[in-house]
Image (cartoon, rainbow, N blue to C red):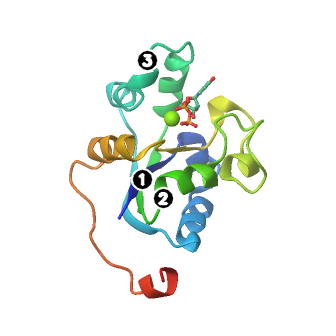
């Protein structure tokens, strides 16, 4: 099944939003396959965001991501990449709908609480980068209550 990489950024950790974010993905019906609290080094943050290295906000973005621990997660389920992005909301919280994570909890684009992979292929790359040790392959007993 499809998997996505979700990261609660340092502001989300500091602000006590870990439980809420996890609860939203759990209650939706997605399965948690990887989870860790980790403070990453500059070179690692630069690798994660390498596609954005030419952007004017890149240096500030890297500083932000290395400013404290993040919660790195892998969530699994049907259409989890696209649905996860919808649950997260627009990149700039000024444009994020209420009911989304950024819409409910963030004000500024440079403090937007959470990251989610933007495509199946980038999810694959990000999961390999963040979880080289591999994932847990447990199966939920709720499966037939979530999928028809
Ligand atoms: N970002 C920023 N300023 C901008 C655009 C993006 O600080 O003008 C930050 C923001 O934290 C965003 C991250 O860079 O989440 C990655 O940007 P991307 O366009 O990939 O947005 P996302 O996929 O996170 O919605
Ligand atoms: Mg992105």
Q: Which mark is residue 115?
A: none
Tell me the crowding category of disc 3: few under 14, some 14 to 19, or many 20 or more residues within 10 angstroms, Cα based: some
Q: Earlier in the sequence, mark 3 or mark 1?
A: 1
The residue pinned by badge 2 equals 80
* The N terminus sits in image quarter: bottom left
Q: Which residue sits at x=38%, y=57%?
A: 3
Tell which tag, 2 or 3, sits nearer the viewer: 2
Q: Which quadrant of the figure has residue 137?
A: bottom left
Q: Is residue 145 above or below residue 2?
A: below
Asked whether the beta carbons under mark 2 and mark 1 sit within 8 Å of each other, the answer is yes
Closest to the observer, 54 or 13: 54
In the rendered image of this protein, does residue 78 appear above or below residue 105?
below
Residue that appears at 64% across and 39% down: 112
Asked if residue 72 shows in the view, the reply is no
Left or right for 72, reference 23? left
| Residue drawn where x is 65% and y is 49% of the image | 15
93 relative to 58, above or below: below
- Per the image, label 2 sits on a secondary structure element best described as helix
Task: Give coordinates of residue 105: x percent, y percent.
Answer: 72, 48
Label at residue 53: 3
Distance of mark 2 from mark 1, alpha carbons? 6 Å
Q: Is residue 39 left or right of residue 98?
A: left
Q: Residues within 10 Å of mark 2 (few under 14, many from 20)?
A: many
Q: Please give the label number shown on residue 4.
A: 1
Measured in 3D between alpha carbons, the distance from the residue under mark 3 to the one under mark 1, in whole angstroms, is 22 Å
Q: Is 128 on the left-hand or right-hand side of 8?
A: left
Left or right relative to 69: residue 34? left
How many numbered dots are placed on residues in this image? Answer: 3
């Amino acid at each position: 099944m499809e998997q996505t990489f979700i990261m609660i950024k340092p502001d989300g950790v500091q602000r006590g939003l870990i439980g809420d974010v996890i609860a939203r993905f759990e209650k939706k019906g997605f399965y948690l396959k990887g989870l860790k609290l980790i403070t990453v080094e500059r070179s690692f943050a630069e690798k994660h965001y390498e596609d954005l290295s030419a952007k004017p906000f890149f240096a500030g973005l890297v500083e932000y991501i290395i400013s404290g621990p993040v919660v790195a997660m892998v969530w699994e389920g049907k259409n989890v990449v696209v649905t996860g992005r919808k649950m997260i909301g627009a990149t700039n919280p000024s444009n994020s709908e209420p009911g989304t994570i950024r819409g409910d909890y963030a004000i500024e684009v440079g403090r937007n609480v959470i990251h989610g992979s933007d495509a199946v292929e980038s999810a694959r790359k990000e999961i390999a980068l963040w979880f080289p040790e591999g994932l847990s392959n447990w199966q939920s007993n709720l499966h037939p209550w979530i999928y028809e």
